[in-house]
Image (cartoon, rainbow, N blue to C red):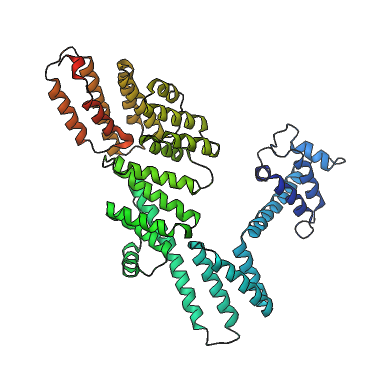
Amino acid sequence: MHNSKLIQVLKTFSKKEIKQFREFTQSPFFNKNKSVISLLDVLIKFYPEFQDKNLDAKNVFKIIFPDEEYDYFKIRNLSSDLLAVSMEFLKIIFFQKNEHQNTLYLLEQLRDRDLDKMFQKLFDVYYQKIKSNHVRDEFYYSNMADLKNELKSFYSPKRPNSDFNLIQEQLDYELTHFLIKALDLYTIMLHEIKQNNYEFKLEMFDEVLIYLEKNKDNIAPVLKMFYLIIMLHKENDDRSFYELKDHGKKIFDSLGFYEKYMYFLHMTGFCAERYNTDCSTDFMKEHFYLSKDNLETDTIVMGKIMYLDFVNHVKVAARVNEFDWAEKYITRFKDQLNEEKESTLNFSYGYIEYMKGNRLKALELLSQTNFPNFIIKIQVKILILQISYEESFYDQAIAMIDSFRHFLARENSVRENYKESFYDYMRITGELIRLKTSVKKKDLRSDLKRLKDAAEKSTQNQFGIKLWLFKMIDNFDLKKTGI
């Protein structure tokens, strides 16, 4: 029974929920089979791990039916019945938590039963509650559309051919909600096109943008934010970035948690693109300030943190020498990592040490990472190669280049333009090692110029590889070579 669907569900219950579920199961309204209650009472003894060797179908059957011979189908059917009760329980607790749907269904019941005074009182109280909330996110417009529809349905049979304003108000709210959802999906698609080169069908994209362009001064603030995010993706320029930044600051308190998250996602995505594609450091500080604001407004995570996001925040801070902030971030959020916690912490602290100049300590920490994701694996390989070069561990660096080449050849998930840049990076690093170790010093200056020109032509600065090459070439110590 350890891996049954029923046990999988029970494992997700908190202590409070397991107690509530027992009370729920005892209610004749939801369950009239006393054996189902007995089964739950037995299973609760194994909560929360459900790993005891005695959690066996035969043992459970014997406890519930001590005088009967084991019947596989009977215990299986009993488990299915309890699983069905647990599904009803999940629906009920979700319904209880969802105030809007809860209120909406109750209003509908009161309306259908002609309990007009009770309907009007409940409607007025709930309507004022929604209106008094300063947040104006997608749920606000969706909820308001629902309420206008409910009020229209209430008045329609009582005073026909009137209250036309409710129809208009419902449409206005519905349209705003639709446009927010559509633009949200458009922005995600535009982001993924850049990230993963996936081709989406952006249905009605141009038509929606034409409408928004005509009405951008009169649309809801959150809708304008998504519109500006789209313009940031389309224009990809400084003006669009700062226009979105200014608008975001003005309306930030009126945004819901999700909208705040998406605002930061696309703003930081622009900064990252400037660094990774344009090899520009102009927005490194802006990138950090966004992460800092994200932390201070508690919108940096949506539940658990993915380790790729975690290390990204650390890198953004460390690149501008904000080491205290990076370490504060690690301390505050390390327990919210959803996976690969040990490797993530080793990478994060290793990156900080590297940026501080403590390369050997960084090498020790980075060597203790073991990530399944190819993106972070590449970053580890790059950092270890850089440290090996800077510490003059040339044999190790050459071996790392060879290992890195084989890894890229096998890894089909890496985009080809990224692969080309990584191959350029390895080739130029290998050339620098050759110049460092060669006894021939002829034409060294022209060789360095050639390598810098080659680095300039490389198309990507993913993980700072171009900037690192420029730094190594510019800092090439000619004196030690006798030039």
Quadrant occupied by the C terminus? top left
Residue sitting nearer the eye, 140 or 10: 140
Q: Give above or below for 438 relative to 314.
A: above
Instruction: From the top left corner, tell me how far across and down residue 225 is, in percent.
Output: 39, 59
* Relative horizontal placement of residue 158, taking residue 167 as reference (left or right): right
Residue drawn at x 56%, y 87% as measured from the top left: 160
Instruction: From the top left corner, tell me how far across and down residue 293 is, in percent.
Output: 44, 47
The count of marks equals 0
Q: Give above or below for 429 relative to 216.
A: above
- Residue 232 shows in the view: no
Residue sitting nearer the eye, 467 or 32: 467
- Residue 286 shows in the view: yes
Residue drawn at x 59%, y 67% as measured from the top left: 129
Quadrant occupied by the N terminus? top right
Task: State the residue lying farthest toward the top.
Answer: 439
| Quadrant in the rendering for residue 8 | top right
Q: Give above or below for 86 relative to 368.
A: below
| Quadrant in the rendering for residue 122 | bottom right
Instruction: From the top left corner, tell me how far across and down residue 465 is, in percent.
Output: 29, 32
